[in-house]
Amino acid sequence: MQGDLRIFVYELPQIKKYQLTLKISQFATENMVHEKLLSSNVRVQDPLRADFFFVPVYPMGVVYKYKRADEAQKKLLYDSIKKYIPQDLKVIACLQESYNRAWCQRQKYLAGFLKYTLSLLKFWDTDNFGESRHIFIFPGGDQQSIFANWKEEIGRSVHLLVEGHYGNYFQNADDKQTQQQRRHMDIVIPGGGDYDTMRPYRKRKVRKIFLSYCGRYSGSKERETIPTLLQQMKEYRKNLLFQEVCTKEQFLENLRTSRYCLTPAGSTPWTARLYGAIAQLCVPVLFNTDVFIAPYNLDAIFNDLSIRVSLEDSFELIIKSILKADYEKIYKNLVENRNKFMVNYSFPELFTELLKIRCRS
C-alpha cells in the first residue's frame, strides 16, 4: 500500500536563513524526517500527482536561530518579516497587564515567519491541493503552539507530533479540546535524539549494569523520585549507575551496557532519553502507565518492550515490578520492534497513518 502513497517535498531556500539544522540536539527529528523524505520512494517530483505536500519548516530550528542571534541580528530577522506579522495576534506576553518585551517580540516573530512561509507555498490555497494536504512537523513539547497563530493559519493541515494526546498532563481545557478535535489530523511519531544517539548500535554489548540513569533529579515529579528509588534499590545489591552529569560518550555507553534505563518525563511526557534507550536496546522504564502515548497508536507493542510503573504505587511495589520483569522476553520484543519507535526507521508506520488520513479524506 505504501507504494501507492505520493508526497511532494517543497524546496524553500528562502527560509534557510531563518532556521538552523539541529543535528546535535534532541530536536534533530525535524531534519531527520525531511532528509528521509527526500530519498524516499514515495517522494514525487510532480506536485500534480501528490497526495500530500511536506513543508520543510524546522520549528525548533527557527526558535534556536532567533534565540542564538545577538540583538542586531534579531532586529534584522524581525524586520525582514515584519509585514507578515498578524495585526490581531493574540499573545499573552504582548498584553499590557502581562507584557514581556522579549517574549512578545519572539512570539510575533515566529507568527510572522509562519505567515511568510505560507506565502511561499504554491499549492496552499488551490482547490485540489489545499491546506488539508500539507504536512508540518513539530518536534518539541510545545507542539503547534510554538506558533501563536497556528490555529488560524495551519489549523486544517496534517501535523507530525512527538507528543501524544496525554490526558491531564499540564493541559488546560482548551488544549484538551483542541487535541480531541485534531485526532484525525495529528500523527504521533517517535521523538529523536541527536544523530549519534539515534544510530542503532549493532555490536552486542555485555549489559553488566542492571539499571542506570544520567541526568537531573529535578524538573518534574518523576525525576524527583529517582534519588529515593536509588537509595531503596541499593538494598537489593544490584549493579546500579546513577549520575547527575555525564558526557555524551558516557551517556551512550550507559545506554549500551545497561539492562534497564530510567526514562522519567520532564516538563512534558516525551523525552529524547526514552528513544535513545530504545535505539541502544536498553529497556526503558517509564514512571507512568497511561500518560505517555506511544507513536502510531502502537501502545500494545510499546508496552511489551518497556516497563511502566506508577508514581501512585509505593517504592517497594515499583522496585518489585522492575525486579520481577522477564528481561529476556522484554529484550526480545525490544529487538524485534525497535525500528517502529525510531524516527529514522519508522517510515513504514508513518506512511500507513498518512494513507489512513488520505482514505478518510
Image (cartoon, grey):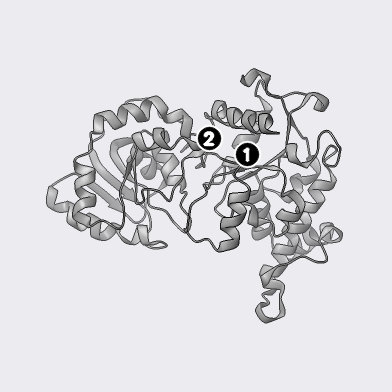
Q: Quadrant of residue 108?
A: bottom right
**Labels 1 & 2 near each other (Cβ < 8 A):** no
**Residue 198, image x, y percentages:** 48, 36
> Distance between the Cα atoms at labels 1 and 2?
11 Å
Picture quarter with the N terminus: top right
Q: Is residue 80 left or right of residue 18?
A: right
Left or right side of 222 for 167: right
What residue appears at the point 84 percent right and 37 percent down from the top-left corner? Answer: 123
For the residue carrying disc 2, how many other residues have a C-alpha within 10 Å: few (<14), some (14-19), or many (20+)?
A: many
Disc marking residue 55: none
Q: Nearer the viewer, residue 308 or 121?
A: 308
Numbered disc in front, either 1 or 2:
2
| Vertical relation: 57 (above or below) 296 | below
Quadrant (top left/top right/bottom left/bottom right) for the C terminus = top right
Residue visible at 17% across and 45% down?
A: 238
Residue beneath label 1, please?
Answer: 31
Is residue 251 in view? yes
Relative to 329, 196 lies left or right = right
Instruction: Give the residue pinned by disc 2.
Output: 343
Residue 279 position within the rendered picture, expressed as x and y whole percent measured from the top left: 42, 34
**Displayed quadrant of residue 2:** top right
Q: Residues within 10 Å of mark 1 (few under 14, many from 20)?
A: many
**Amino acid identity at mark 1:** Asn
Q: Please determine whether, in this image, residue 212 is positioned above or below residue 133.
A: below
- Residue 80 locus on image (x, y percent): 83, 57
Asked whether 315 or 127 is in front, the reply is 127
Which of disc 2 and disc 1 is earlier in sequence? 1
- In terms of secondary structure, where does tag 2 sit? loop
Task: Check disc 2 and give the amino acid type.
Answer: Val
